[in-house]
Amino acid sequence: MRKADLINGVEQVTRALAESGLELPLVEVARLGYRREPVPGELLTRLLSALREYGLRAHRYTRPARLVAEQLELAALEQADTWSLLIAAENRAQQAFAFAERVRLATQYLPRVTGLLGQAGIPSVDAARRGDGAAEILTVQVIESPRRFSTPTRLATLLESLDALYGACAVLEGAEPGGLSVIACDSGSDKTFELMGAAPVIAALRALLLSVWDRVVFYRELPAAQRYRHAAESLPILGRIREAEAQGRMAREQAELLRRRIVEGTGRFLVSGATIPELQERAYANPRTLMAPAPKLLAPPLDGD
């Protein structure tokens, strides 16, 4: 699991537990049970309500959050059998205490652990993550095979393609073309890079990559090499360059160099086999299949795999 996914999963679980208010009624049921005192019906009603609220939130967990909840043995809190056990069973005090301890561990200590994994303390990066600065962050995911790792050439191809496309977008947006930075990298089943640049340029680059994806899907019946060429040569951004050239806002030589930079950069991005998270929202095709890397950019299988 990637570090970013783990942090997000922990945040989902701790938020669901906190918003449901589950810990307090569990502790009260356990305390009264150990004292052999009767449990008021009002308390059992509050416990059932908290369990229901947690179940509704847990139903929306992403896969990383689901795995975190399972590792903490919290998944049982979503099951009706557990609810009956906590409300009606003779040993409900022991059960309530055990679940209260797990909830407390998740809400009090897990955020501290994930805090050690985060990246903070750099004002420009923090502002970009919050979305309230002059910079913006683009996340790029490198599609990995379970048995074949990337070569250095593949990662270099990807980053060089993004640098070229960012520079082209910067020219069109009237910004500094050399302002792209790699601020973070992460790995799990896939590798992820976070790149930071000027907000309008990153927005233009993201839109460019989304338009690349639309055309890859459109030409999905073609062989990979033809699909990538047609996709690169039919991008809407090329129309902006033609328009700027026709209106005299861009010299012919500059327009040609910019077109070549975009087409070549797009081609290199495609053969490197990468996606961005926004592609997952366009679920009419599988990015892992259509955006797979060129085989020559993958290392040979490891011995024994």
Image (cartoon, rainbow, N blue to C red):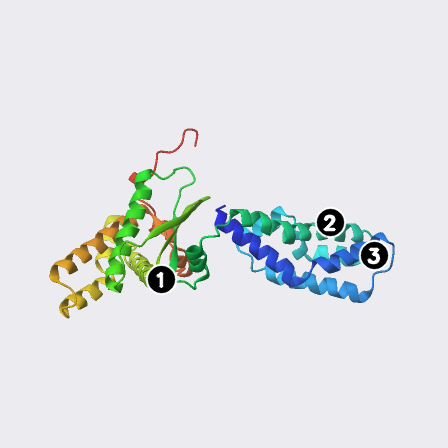
Q: What residue is shown with label 1?
A: 199
Q: Is residue 103 left or right of residue 153?
A: right
Q: In this view, does 88 lie to the left or right of 73?
A: right
Q: Nearer the viewer, residue 91 or 21?
A: 21
Residue 48 coordinates in the image, percent (x, y): 72, 63
Callout 1: SS:
helix
Q: What residue is shown with label 2?
A: 98
- Mark 1 or 2, nearer chain start: 2
Residue in the image at 42% along x and 61% along y: 281
**Residue farthest top in this picture:** 303
The amino acid type of the residue labelled 3 equals: Leu
Residue in the image at 74% along x and 57% along y: 26
Callout 2: SS:
helix
Callout 3: SS:
helix
Label 2 Cα crowd, 10 Å radius (few <14 / some 14-19 / many 20+): some
Residue 75 visible in the current orientation: no
Label 3 Cα crowd, 10 Å radius (few <14 / some 14-19 / many 20+): some
Q: Quadrant of residue 107?
A: bottom right
Measure how far apart labels 1 and 3 are at the Cα level: 56 Å
Instruction: From this view, report whether residue 78 is shown above or below residue 147.
Output: below
Closer to the observer: label 1 or label 2? 1
The circle on residue 32 is 3
Residue in the image at 31% along x and 47% along y: 158
